[in-house]
Image (cartoon, grey):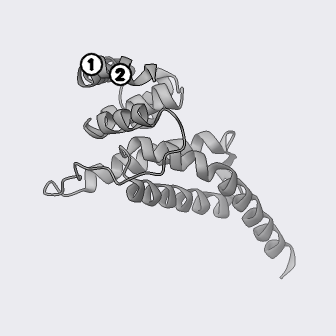
Amino acid sequence: MGATGTAGGGRDAEYREFALARGGHLYRSACLLTGGDTHLAEDLVQETLGRMYAVWRRSGGLFGGRRIDNPAGYAQRVLHRAFIDHHRRRSSTERPSGELPELAVQADDSSLRIALLDALAGMAPQDRAVLVLRYWEDVSVEETADILRISTGAVRTRSSRALGRLRTQLGDSLADLAAH
């Protein structure tokens, strides 16, 4: 095969290592973005990893002629854009289910997690994406704006309003759930 086949094989091995290391984190983020829809979360992670592989394979971790400095951050960006794209493509007649599937819960804070997932599921996709990026992924306002292709002012406004809606929706139950 020669040097090209070896380099391609090395790229594949590097990519597999990257995908195995980041897959779980991408899946957890996708679950939050989708409001607990594990099937959609799996689809989004697959789409993200597929897009990452195409870039990785073509350029060996290079993007636009230069190396991706932060492949994990780039993968998060791809995931969030895939989520937003999914909601733009979805037919207006489709409606998410009002019930979450039974989840195997091992932590003591299961009631809090379920309440938060329910509350996130009831939010607009863009608001959910802003909250997950800002408060779960700990991404800056500027980076969030860049990832979602909106202004920094829109990120701040959406964050503030979405947090207000979460507080209203969860009300006193949040304090009760967190205390247990």
Residue at x 48% of width, y 51% of height: 104
Tag 2, which secondary structure? helix
Decide if residue 43 is on the left or right side of residue 71: left
Decide if residue 71 is on the left or right side of residue 31: right
Tag 1, which secondary structure? helix
Residue hosting label 1: 171
Is 13 located above or below residue 156 in the figure? below
Distance (Cα) linking label 2 and label 1: 6 Å
Kind of residue indicated by mark 2:
Leu
Please tell me which residue lies in front, 128 or 155: 128
Q: Position of residue 156 (x, y in %)?
A: 36, 18
Q: Position of residue 63 (x, y in %)?
A: 62, 50
Decide if residue 71 is on the left or right side of residue 126: right
Q: Position of residue 175 (x, y in %)?
A: 37, 17
C-beta proximity under 8 Å, tags 2 and 1: yes
**Residue found at the very far right of the displayed protein:** 2
Please tell me which residue lies in front, 107 or 34: 107
> How many residues crowd around disc 2 within 10 Å: few (fewer than 14), some, or many (20 or more)?
some
Residue hosting label 2: 174
Residue 4 in view, yes or no: yes
> From the image, which quarter does the C terminus lie in?
top left
